[in-house]
Amino acid sequence: MTKAAFTPRVFSGIQPSGGLTLGNYLGALKRFADAQDKGIETIYCMVDLHAITVWQDPAKLRHATRELCAGFIASGVDPQKSILFNQSQVAEHAQMAWIFNCVARMGWMKRMTQFKDKAGKNAENASLGLFGYPALMAADILVYHATHVPVGEDQKQHLELTRDIAMKFNHDYGVDFFPITEPVIEGAATRVMSLRDGSKKMSKSDPSDMSRINLTDDADTIAKKIRKAKTDPEPLPSEVEGLENRPEARNLINIFAALSDQTVDQVMAEVGGKAFSEFKPMLADLAVAQMSPISTEMSRLMQDTAEIDRILEAGADRARAIAAPILQRTYDIVGMVGARVS
C-alpha cells in the first residue's frame, strides 16, 4: 500500500470557559500567531462542545466564546491567514467523534489522567461527555487531517490517543487515510506556573487573582502582580542549573524568556547575579509592553460582538469546506450506505 502524502496542516483549540491568562497566551495564542506565518495552513477553534462536558451558564458561554475569539485576534491570529471558528458551528466535529467513539477502546479512555483529575472522587456523577471527550478531541484534529498540533504537556496524552485512534482506524479498514499527527511542544513557557506557587500551573480557577495575569488586566495591574509575585531570598543564578529547586525563580525566568523571544540560557546570561528587586521591574516592564496592548485590543473588539460573530461564521464556512469531504470519505470507508454530509 502506497503511503499517503498529507498536506501539512496545524490544528489547535482552546475551551471558551472564560478568563484567558498569560499561560494561555504564552502556551498557546502566541505560538498560534507565530505558526500562521510559516507557510503552513493553520486552523484554530474555540472548542465549545468540550466546554459543556461540565455545566456552563449559556449567557456566560456565549460571552466567553466571543471573548476568546477577541483574544485570538488581539494576540496576533489573523482571521485572513488562519481559519478561526467555534466548534459547534461545524457539525462534522461531532459526527466524526461518533465514528471515533466506536474505534477507541474503554481501556484507553480509563487511562486518561485528565478525566481522573477533573472527575475526582465523584467520577460516577461526571458526564459521559467528560469521559469520552478525548475521542472528540481526536475528531477535532483528524476531521481536518491535521499533521501538527501545538499542545502543552498536559494535553500530550490526549494527542497520543489521537494517534492511537488514527492507527487503529487505518489498520481496521486497511487504509492509510488518517495522518499520525505530531505534537508540537516547544518554547520556554509552554507551561506557565502560578505567581503565588511555582509548583502549580497558572489557572483561571485559582481563587487568588494575584496568582495569574489575565489578558484583560491593564498595565498597572500587570505590573503590580509581577512586583508581588512570590520569590525566594537568593539572587538569580547565572546558570540554568542554579534554578533547580527554585520553582518561583524558574517560572519568572521562563516568562521573561518567552515574552522576549529568548532562550532561558540567554536570559540567565543577562540577569544572573541580580536580586529580584532588580529583576522584577525588568519583567514588569516587559510584561506591560507585551500584554497591555492585547488587553486594549480585546476590549475594543468586544465592543462589536456582531463583527466577532461574522468572523466566526466566515471561519466555519472555510473549516467546513475542508472537513466535509474528509468526513464523507470516512463514511464511505466505514461502509455507511447513502450517508451524505450536508
Image (tube, rainbow, N blue to C red):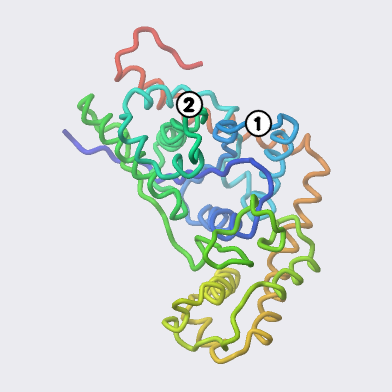
Q: Which residue is mark 1?
A: 313
- Residues 211 and 321: in front is 211
Residue 275, horizontal then vertical, whole percent: 62, 89
First in sequence, mark 2 or 1: give its number.
2
The correct choice, above or below, for 189 with respect to 205 in the image is below
Q: Which mark is residue 128?
A: 2
The structure residue drawn at horizontal position 57% and vertical position 87%, both measured from the top left corner, is 234
Residue 244, horizontal then vertical, whole percent: 44, 78
Q: Secondary structure at mark 1?
A: helix
Q: Amino acid at mark 2?
A: Leu
Residue 305, horizontal then vertical, whole percent: 78, 37
Neighbourhood count class around disc 1 (C-alpha, 10 Å): few under 14, some 14–19, many 20 upward: some
Q: Amino acid at mark 1?
A: Glu
Neighbourhood count class around disc 2 (C-alpha, 10 Å): few under 14, some 14–19, many 20 upward: few
Tell whether 262 sits left or right of 66: left
User: How many marks on residues?
Assistant: 2
Q: Secondary structure at mark 2?
A: helix
